[in-house]
Image (tube, rainbow, N blue to C red):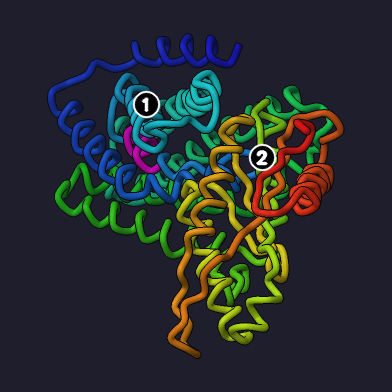
Amino acid sequence: MIEAVAVIASAGTAMLLPVSGADWARFGVLAVGAAIYIELTRSIERQREFVAGAGPYVDTKSVWSFAAVLVCPPALATLMVVFTYALAWFRIWPRRRPSPLYRWIFSAATVLCGTQLAVAVLHLGMSHYPGIPSAQLPAGIIDVGIVALAGLARFAANYGLVIVAALMASPDLKLAKLMETFGEQSLEAAALGLGLVAATLVTLQPVVLVGVVIALVALHRCVLLAQFRQAARIDAKTGLYASGWWPQLAERALDRAKVRGTGLAVLMLDLDHFKDVNTNFGHLGGDEALRAVAREIAAETRDYDMTGRFGGEEFIVFLPEVDTSEVHRIAERIRRRIHGLAIPNGASDEPITGLTISIGAAIYPDEGIATLDDLIRAADKALLLAKDSGRNQTRIANTF
């Protein structure tokens, strides 16, 4: 339904204005900027996607599509949305997609609906459209107000449609749960503001547009990535997510899996006979072993998986979008990698070797698994079975 509305609205606004050669030139400059930006931030976007929760996703690609709304005819503004979403689909997720294609199409459709609403506001209110705010007063002030109104209309349409769709897809989710990350939407406002800057630069001095790309990449690396990795959220000993933080990320990932109808697996990992390591190599040697094991676990997981320390010598990994066979393969790769470790020990010339790890896994959705606690309990039960069955092995809940 939303997709049909987006197509009809886009076709309707496309007829408002013709497209000139200069329009195509501005579109091309913005498209190049968008492509560079998507390429430079795609690894971070993979991580953001899976910790974003069930609510609306902060889409910083809107810098480019909103700039196109301002300085390009409606047909090219629509094309910019399609271009950025298509490019993100192929470049951010080149092998395994975070969700079915139709969900990305739906997301693009909600943005297109908001885009056409912004086009209507600008077309009716701007002193000259498409274009940047007038340099003359008071017309310029009025134009800036119209641009802000267009940005608000675009955001409200997109946000509202996503909320309604999420509630329809998963009625058991409460509205408060979907809106728990509403404060992060201030980043969307920042993106729209940078869109106005990008529109002005592409009109007056296109070469300076590189500054917008730099600002956006810095926004990701200094704000967005830090939001999930820094500020006491990282376990100091292992460098993995701390036990006070990863449950929040896991809850978000599970909410997202429920809304999207996808899966989420968890691995519970426990080093076997770890007390012997502390006894034979001292606690400093034990700490070195924990750090080395953490590095090996991280090396065998994808950059958008969530790896944390559960406590003591226990670790936990959350794997979005995997099936039972893939969970088993990942767990076995980790188990074999740790068994082959030779860890330098600063206290002596003898390296720490012979480590083994037992792994229990569980997958949502599955029988008796509806919440994060259910998921962790099932994985813990599988871990205990791996321990009782001789250690140094992987067991998956509900498959034994």
Mark 1, mark 2: which one is toward the viewer?
2
Q: Amino acid at mark 1?
A: Ala
Q: Position of residue 307 (x, y in %)?
A: 59, 56
Residue range (magenta):
63-70
- Circle on res. 86: 1
Q: Position of residue 381 (x, y in %)?
A: 82, 47
Label 1 – label 2 distance at C-alpha: 28 Å
Residue located at (43% from left, 65% from top): 222
Above or below, 117 relative to 247: above
Of 318 and 93, nearer the camera is 318
Above or below, 248 relative to 319: below
Residue located at (52% from left, 70% from top): 353
Q: Position of residue 110 (x, y in %)?
A: 54, 25
Q: Amino acid at mark 2?
A: Ala
Label 2 sits on a secondary structure element that is strand
**Residue 68 lies in magenta, yes or no?**
yes
Give the quarter of the figure containing the N terminus: top right
Q: Main secondary structure of the magenta part?
A: helix
Q: Which residue is mark 2?
A: 265
- Left or right? Give the position of 400 relative to 187: right
Residue located at (68% from left, 71% from top): 274
